[in-house]
Image: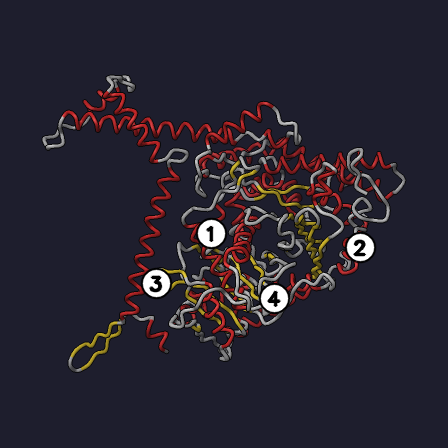
Amino acid sequence: MAEAHQAVAFQFTVTPDGVDFRLSREALKHIYLSGINSWKKRLIRIKNGILRGVYPGSPTSWLVVVMATVGSSYCKVDISMGLVCYIQRCLPEGCGPYQTPQTRALLSMVVFSTGVWMTGIFFFRQTLKLLLSYHGWMFEMHGQTSHFTKVWAICVRLLSSRRPMLYSFQTSLPKLPVPCVPATIQRYLESVRPLLDDAEYYRMETLAKDFQEKTAPRLQKYLVLKSWWATNYVSDWWEEYVYLRSRAPLVVNSNYYVMDFVLIQNTNIQAARLGNIVHAMILYRRKLDREEIKPVMAQGIVPMCSYQMERMFNTTRIPGKESDLLQHLSDSRHVAVYHKGRFFKVWLYEGSQLLKPCDLEMQFQKILDDPSPPQPGEEKLAALTAGGRTEWAQARQAFFSSGKNKAALDAIERAAFFVALDEESPHYDPEDEASLSLYGKALLHGNCYNRWFDKSFTIIAFKNGQLGLNTEHAWADAPIIGHLWEFVLGTDTFHLGYTETGHCLGKPNPMLMAPQRLHWDIPEQCRAIIESSYQVAKALADDVELYCFQFLPFGKGLIKKCRTSPDAFVQIALQLAHFRDRGKFCLTYEASMTRMFREGRTETVRSCTSESTAFVQAMVEGSHMKADLQDLFRKASKKHQNMYRLAMTGCGIDRHLFCLYLVSKYLGVSSPFLAEVLSEPWRLSTSQTAQFQIRMFDPDKYPKHLGAGGGFGPVADDGYGVSYMIAGENTIFFHISSKFSSSETVSLSRSCSGLRRGYYLGPFLAGEESLVVGTEGQGLT
């Protein structure tokens, strides 16, 4: 119990002689240093708030304006056109030694200069916002940039040339526009045309026209009003109704996973790898707190919204009976760790100093070496976060609202993030077809009680030093956690490093406080609920079939030589794969980001189009000439790229209809059209994993430093979930999920073996037949 005593600043004992106080100097020292660190963070936030608030101006520019005004005054030039004299007359009279005419004149010039400076900042900001509202550059062909776009790009660069902080552009980003109803209806009908026969399409067209003429105008007015008042008319409703109000288990249904480097291994020592990774994550958090991370820029010019990064650390999803809550803390100085059914609390700091990687390795190794058994009910406790949300909320209120259970739960929920130390050793072996899939399954759900699915993310450290993440979805989308992961893997490999024996560099401090075991008192009734949640989660996990593989014939390098979008290429290939699998087309979801707008998240690209289905049918028939197939493919690719750009620029379909549906529910208005649209299942849900958001290293120089992306469970019970990462120039990673219980989905181990060989990607990818899909003289065979 020595560690517990060290954590107490003072103790007192009541004796017949009075009260005996005992002070702990070490604990008081830690409290003092913690307070100093807290004040430093406050001052940094204040400084960053000022610098962010005046961007693209700076304190230096204010000083320049003041000096210019004062200098012109001494040169007998009144650049204020009388305003300085007017301000001087308006200043209150004083009788102090500093109320001389010279002092009043100087003060007036400072006030005038500050006003000019602030007016300039406001003007530049509004100008930048206006410039960022232009999206015509996205629709111009590569190499055919218009003169207008070139001038626009120069202006944007000039206004954002000063080194920006992470959130410098937030107030300059435009708001997400509300599309007009007729345009949304037209695009919707166009998207479902290839999926419906003539009679079904006529019925849907009638419903849509009736909605457009009668119901939509009223709903649209409320939505436009919200867009004026709110920062983003979609994001808060999307977070609440799609994520937080869902009562389904998070495991498989919502959380997703991210993989480690799979072609190299820095060390096979579990504690050492985790020590470096956790240290790198806290370095990233420090940069995040200080806003030292560069904003992500599209094409190196257009800033992306960074607001989702705010809740990356110190965030937990708190269960509620009807709706969950995202709890975010400004700081956390520890992580929660799970190993062999036991929970621990590991401090990240000693006083105000971040622990070195070697210190963290020592702490994690102590947990690995700890032989103590789990307490009754402790081993499967995290299954509560994997079961139904209402059941977890009720159990939390009944059994974890007081006493040692509340204290232990607080230690987990208030942690910076969660760490799972696993005893398994999954890894990717190119010679073993199932190895990557087993690795993905371990990350997606584990054994359903060794992940805390409510935390913003869980680091999973396997016994062989392989790592991965399981990420909660409500707080942010995949590119955000991808940004963190790229930094962490790059820092681990190229900046921190390991000794020749695979341990962290440096010498650990043996005097550090040991990891603290969390203590629970879990009654039989609670254990029964834990077991019930575990069975629910296990049934979900056992029903998921996941197949992950590396597609090796080629990557984006060869695709780009064909002058087509790699994303469009894969999406059209997936349409062909699905049609060959099922003999029909289905509603297809592809996630696109809307982060060019303030607080933007995602929009849907409906990638099953009339153009892509025409190409697929022509491919399946096998009687068309290559030139005809080329033309059909180019049309399908062009259509997909245009839809993707429309979605990114706020002209999508589904978020607009989603918000109109919510307004109709608030108003109590019935809409058969909206009800049918919102109930349509996405039997093919797809997403591309972002990469190289941070240039931590040169991928051409280190071609094997590739992560395999990540994946998610199927959105529909009778459908597929497909995640892919176009990794570098010569390979693509696929993560495909479905459910064993569905008779509509085939065995992935069978179907994807054909996809792996290029069969389902079509002969135009890597099959036995040859098809030129490129330009003349640059064919892909």
The numbered mark, 1 or 3, whose residue comes first in the sequence reads: 1
First in sequence: mark 1 vs mark 4: 1
SS category of the residue bearing label 3: loop
Q: What's the residue type where badge 4 is placed?
A: Gly
Name which of mark 2 and mark 1 comes first in the sequence.
1
Does the CB distance between marks 1 and 4 fall below 8 Å? no
| 67 lies left or right of 362 | left
Compared with 397, 728 (above or below) is above
From the viewer's perspective, is the residue at label 4 or at label 3 nearer? 3
Q: Which of marks 2 and 1 is in front?
A: 2
**Residue found at x 59% / y 67%:** 268
Which circle marks residue 351 in the picture?
3
Instruction: Quickly name the residue at label 1.
Output: 311
Q: Marks 1 and 3, how far apart in space?
A: 24 Å
Judged left or right of residue 24, residue 772 is right
Crowding at dot 3, Cα within 10 Å, few <14 / some 14-19 / many 20+, comes out as some
Which comes sooner in the sequence, label 2 or label 3?
3
Left or right of 429? Residue 595 is left
Q: Looking at the picture, which amino acid does disc 2 mark?
A: Gly
Judge by depth and name the residue closer to the eye, 505 or 736.
505
Compared with 46, 642 (above or below) is above
